């Protein structure tokens, strides 16, 4: 019997435009574009980009701008936001941006929507979002949807020739919103390890109201995935991201990716080592057989229709090899050449 990965699951990449020591920050955007071109050649279903504001280790703050560049360099792969953080934007402006993208790259653009605020108080102030601001995320999604579909009080332009897919980056509350609005969900982070996840997903599916965009509930699982020839080699690939996360707990700053040799030469406290190990344990990292086993169990446990990998490492050649190996092990066939 074929595994669930062979039988049903689509495969996508989410690239956060991670900066790297020794490169200018602008290079992170060039690296993202090059990775998208490679992902299309490999046969990935989607390539999404992120929105982070004033984070030292991430160069992507404006998904629509970066998607314009991605669309110009690719021809078939779906491109999208993972996601636009709606509390920071007016729904009309987001609609106009994605209507323009859809007009330029027809039937290739996805709109993923999140509600995460800026990570620090200064960033939230710069974004004009106070801590006491009301949560209007559900209403903003509805307003945005109406603008995209030409059902609002004013007509956003250019008028769409087709329905632009929308996705909710969901936690517990986001799942309920997505179910009521009839939208697919993308789940990741701590919620994947929550014991309440099966009940939350069951509620999403039970309460789902079919819509123009999604006649049935649909779940995408987003997580860190890295593949190498052996489990040990894969852990080395995951170390730069784990190190940056662990160091951010000490310094308050999420920094650029560093080479593995540089990381190993630094002083490791016992607390730092524990944090690195904790982060490594959260991802799906290992040989093809190890990763295949983990992803198959996850797909069965969540009923996910799609896996979206958001991995990053310092070594870009190793990152490209990991992307190729992941695509091959999920689809069980060699990539396009």
Image (cartoon, rainbow, N blue to C red):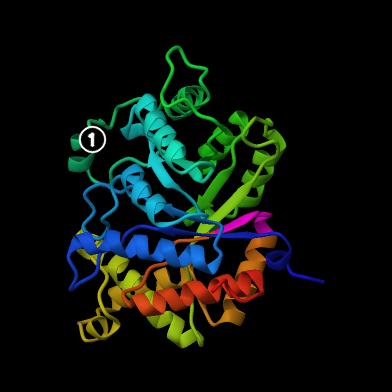
Residue 137 appearing in the image: yes
Q: Residue at x 68, y 33 (%)?
A: 207
| Range shown magenta | 301-307
Q: Please indicate whether residue 113 sits to the left or right of residue 307 in the image.
A: left
Determine the image quadrant of residue 268.
bottom left
The percent position of residue 308, horizontal first and vertical second, equals: 52, 58
Determine the image quadrant of residue 215.
top right
Residue 224 appearing in the image: no
The residue wearing badge 1 is 127
User: Camera-side residue: 192 or 256?
Assistant: 256
Q: Residue at x 23, y 45 (%)?
A: 120
Q: Quadrant of the C terminus?
A: bottom right
The percent position of residue 46, horizontal first and vertical second, equals: 52, 55
Q: Residue at x 37, y 34 (%)?
A: 97
Q: Residue at x 29, y 74 (%)?
A: 272
Q: Please indicate whether residue 331 sits to the left or right of residue 89 in the image.
A: right
The percent position of residue 306, horizontal first and vertical second, equals: 61, 56
């Amino acid at each position: 019997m074929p595994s669930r990965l062979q039988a049903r699951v689509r495969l996508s990449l989410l690239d956060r435009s991670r900066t790297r020591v020794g490169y200018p920050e602008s290079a992170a955007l060039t690296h993202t574009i090059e990775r998208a071109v490679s992902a299309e050649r490999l046969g990935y279903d989607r390539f999404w980009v992120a929105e982070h504001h004033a984070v030292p280790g991430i160069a992507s703050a404006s998904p629509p701008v970066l998607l314009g560049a991605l669309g110009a360099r690719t021809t078939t792969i779906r491109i999208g936001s993972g996601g636009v953080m709606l509390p920071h934007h007016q729904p009309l402006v987001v609609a106009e941006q994605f209507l323009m993208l859809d007009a330029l790259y027809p039937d290739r653009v996805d709109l993923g929507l999140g509600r995460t605020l800026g990570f620090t108080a200064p960033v939230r102030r710069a974004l004009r979002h106070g801590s006491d601001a009301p949560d209007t995320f559900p209403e903003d999604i509805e307003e945005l949807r109406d603008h995209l579909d030409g059902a609002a009080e004013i007509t956003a332009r250019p008028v769409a020739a087709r329905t632009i897919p929308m996705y909710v980056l969901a936690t517990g509350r986001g799942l309920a919103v997505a179910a009521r609005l009839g939208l697919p969900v993308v789940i990741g982070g701590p919620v994947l390890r929550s014991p309440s996840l099966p009940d939350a997903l069951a509620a999403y599916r039970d309460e789902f109201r079919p819509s123009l965009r999604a006649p049935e509930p649909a779940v995408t699982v987003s997580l860190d995935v890295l593949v190498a020839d052996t489990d040990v080699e894969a852990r080395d690939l995951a170390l730069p991201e784990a190190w940056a996360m662990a160091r951010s707990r000490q310094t308050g700053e999420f920094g650029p990716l560093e080479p593995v040799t540089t990381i190993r030469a630094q002083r490791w406290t016992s607390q730092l080592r524990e944090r690195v190990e904790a982060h490594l344990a959260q991802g799906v990292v290992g040989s093809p057989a190890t990763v295949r086993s983990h992803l198959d169990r996850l797909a069965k446990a969540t009923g996910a229709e799609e896996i979206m990998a958001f991995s990053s490492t310092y070594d870009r050649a190793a990152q490209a090899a990991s992307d190729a190996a992941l695509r091959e092990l999920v689809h069980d066939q060699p990539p396009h050449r």
